[in-house]
Amino acid sequence: MILTQCPSCRTLFQIDSDALEACGGAVRCGQCAAVFQADVYRLEGDDAQEPDRPPARTWPWALAALLLGVALGAQGLYALRAPLARLAPARPLIHGLCRAVACGLPHPAALDRFRLLTLHVARQDNDGLLRIRARLKNTAAFPQSLPSLGVTLLSVRGRVIARARFPASAFLRHPRTVLGPGASARVRLALRAPPEAAGWRLALLTAAKR
């Protein structure tokens, strides 16, 4: 077996010596169809090494992989922006990024960090209205979306007579959507209660998604 190289396309071939002798040394390149004398372009020793090839252009793939990684990272950061904003070390970064790209950072609602203070509930017999007065305070160290207020009316025996859910816009004296850390807002709500209502129960609920 001898090793020869096509002078036209530089393709390497191994050719049986007997077959080469039978065809008078002339061969046709299977790659580019050029005809050449195999013995003239025979390679031996160091010349038999694979010819130098231009380096593969890997940078476009590396750049595409980098851009894909950045895009996936940005997507993950966007999806987790609300819980990350609750962490003190990450809060300034998340708020700064959302201000820069207008990503609409939703404020989390940790219901256990809300408090109803100075709560007063009274029923007025003259108009049949149940009036609720309180101060809603956000004790968290981060701003929160305001919760809804759930009101349950009970009979003398504790049977549920009616249930209602009120958004913040219905019970806040000065409507807003977010309550800052340590801030409070005045709660004012009046609702008509049936005559058989003898008790009540209040609950703070996660605001309904629009």
Image (spheres, rainbow, N blue to C red):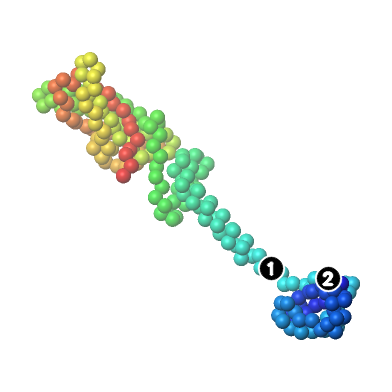
- Quarter of the image that includes the C terminus: top left
Q: Position of residue 89 (x, y in %)?
A: 52, 41
Q: Is residue 22 above or below residue 14?
A: below
Q: Amino acid at mark 1?
A: Ala
Number of numbered discs: 2
Q: Residues within 10 Å of mark 2 (few under 14, many from 20)?
A: few
In this view, the residue farthest toward the right is 45
Locate residue 38, reporting x and y percent. 83, 81
Return the mark for residue 99: none
Q: Earlier in the sequence, mark 1 or mark 2?
A: 2
Q: Residue furthest left?
A: 126
Q: Residue at x 78, y 79 (%)?
A: 6
Q: What kind of residue is marked 2?
A: Gln
Q: Report crowding for label 1: few under 14, some 14 to 19, many 20 or more residues within 10 A (C-alpha).
A: few
- The answer to whether 113 is drawn above or below residue 9 in the figure is above
Label 2 SS: loop
Of 84 and 45, nearer the camera is: 45
For mark 1, give the secondary structure: loop
Q: Closer to the observer: label 1 or label 2?
A: 2
Q: Out of 30 and 64, give the one closest to the viewer.
A: 30
- Mark number for residue 56? 1
Residue 143 in view in this figure: no
Residue 60 vertical placement versus 37 (above, below):
above
Residue 205 is left or right of residue 49, and the answer is left
Q: How far apart are the two marked residues, 1 and 2, measured between alpha carbons?
A: 19 Å
Task: Give the residue pinned by disc 2.
Answer: 49
Residue at point 19% right, 31% down? 190
The residue positioned 75% from the left and 79% from the top of the image is 29
- Quarter where residue 201 is shown: top left
The answer to which quarter of the image holds residue 205 is: top left
Q: Quadrant of residue 162?
A: top left
